[in-house]
Amino acid sequence: MINSSDLKLTAIGTDIKRKNAEALVLGIYKSDDKVRIANSVLGAQSTATLEQTLNDLGVAAKADEFTRLPGVEDSKAKVLGFIGLGVSELSQLTAETLRRAAGSAARQLSGVKSALFALPTESVELTAAVAEGIALGNYRFENFRSKKSEKPQLTEAILVTPVSADKQLPAALKRAAILGRAVRATRDLINTPANELYPESFAATVRDYSKSLPLKVTVYDEKKLAKDGFGGLLGVGGGSDRPPRMVKIEYSPAKASRHLALVGKGITFDTGGISIKPAAGMHAMKSDMSGAAAMFQTIAGIAELGLNLKVTAWLCLAENMPGSRATRPGDVLSMYGGKTVEVLNTDAEGRLVMADGLMAASEEKPDAIIDIATLTGAQMLALGLRTAGIMGDEALRDQLVAVSDRVGEQAWGMPLPEELRPSIDSQVADLANIGERMGGMMTAAVFLQEFVGSVDDKQIPWAHIDFAGPAFNEGAPWGYTPKNGTGAQVRTLIAFAEEFAAN
Ligand code: BES
Ligand code: MN
Ligand code: ZN
């Protein structure tokens, strides 16, 4: 289910003749109405001629605009690829504009196996951003095609950079490769259809993948879930012939002093259950396990990086189907830990499985809990398709928003208005699973908060990420983001863990 194809990332100085590659990628921008090659590594003559040609072709040098031209004598590459940087002055370049440009080029550069990337990178940070962009953009998902594409995919990227000899660069490139692998594996899982990826096969994939990493995997099957009272997972999974699973993944380096818990929504398919969804577009609900996939690959990435931090990930896996044993509207479930929930809408299933996960995570008294879920359509109404909503403990929430900003992922802090709380009161149980529709993303978060445990009467610092929109791209690819599964938030979560481990 997870492809192992990998990419070799190396760096050389700006003397490009020292290295053979099939293609040479250069960044272009438009300034004073003229297309210019950014920090061209070609000779002055070739550079001037190529700039003129690009101008004559009407190239605008916008972001995602990729132009191929035949190679020139100054380089051994037979293909030149020009990617628009999307800025009008080089001083406007940021790590993220470079990451997107490199990713966009890698994504559109099919048909070559090796390429030199000579984008303007004056620092290790910017070189790493280019490396990350390539590792993110160079992605294909062909597992379900009987004939694979005949065009080869990039297997070697050589970064051309003035900081090629910097002592910090090898570690930065290694980190970029690890992040790229984690994000691509997340996408593979999201893109795998629900007839292949269901709770049991998801759990088996986690076990298998984790064998080569310092991770301990424990799978709770339906018997264990019933014995321990995981009523959310069992209630949601009851309508499917494929029983639910809770997967606990532990990374516990010997010297770690802090403990971070991660909880992911893993609905391998969301039909809505008895409160069934309309047919149009339902196929995209194979992506309703994006949260679990993201947390799995976050902890895998943390283990690969060898961070000094204890991490426990809880993957809440169930298939929401309208079978004869499905939860009915009006049914009352007893969640892990004993709180009862009246299910007024079986399509609000994510919060039910997450409630079990948050309670289980809380029992271990971690220093912080982060959860991520494709929880509400309201997230997309509030913030659109590319910006995740982050709620919860204000300090933790703001820290996550700042980290996402730094790594180039879009996220925005949202409140937990206390007036929403009475809307999830139930006539018969402790809580109802739906409430106020206006601000529904926050209503769902207010529900989740009820399942976050306390230590010495103080709630464990907790943040909730709703990425219903960003997890799955039904539109055109852009930057390093492909169509379908995006792997969004994995880089934010890993970067957060690095920060959390450091202080
Ligand atoms: N998985 C959906 C949310 C979703 C919708 C994610 C579209 C991605 C794209 C979730 O389980 C759901 O159905 N939520 C309901 C909740 C409602 C019944 C309170 C929703 O948002 O409509
Ligand atoms: Mn649903
Ligand atoms: Zn759902």
Image (tube, rainbow, N blue to C red):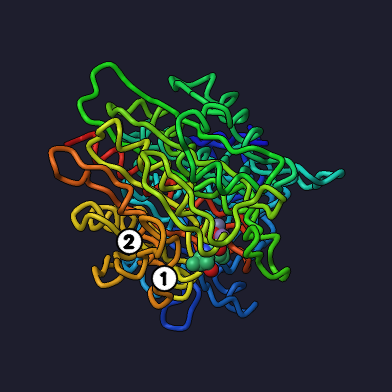
The residue at 58%/67% (across/down) is: 50
Task: Say the numbered circle drawn on residue 53.
Answer: none
Picture layout, residue 179 above or below residue 218: below
Q: Amino acid at mark 2?
A: Val
The residue at 55%/47% (across/down) is: 235
Q: Residues within 10 Å of mark 1 (few under 14, many from 20)?
A: many
Q: Amino acid at mark 1?
A: Gly
In the image: residue 60, left or right of residue 324? left
Picture layout, residue 292 above or below residue 209: below
- Tell me which label, 1 or 2, sits earlier in the chain: 1
**Residue 498 quadrant:** top left
Q: Give 134 or 200, whichever is nearer the viewer.
A: 200
* Label 1 CB less than 8 angstroms from ligand 1: yes
Picture layout, residue 245 above or below residue 149: above
Residue highlighted by disc 2: 446
Q: Residue furthest right?
A: 146
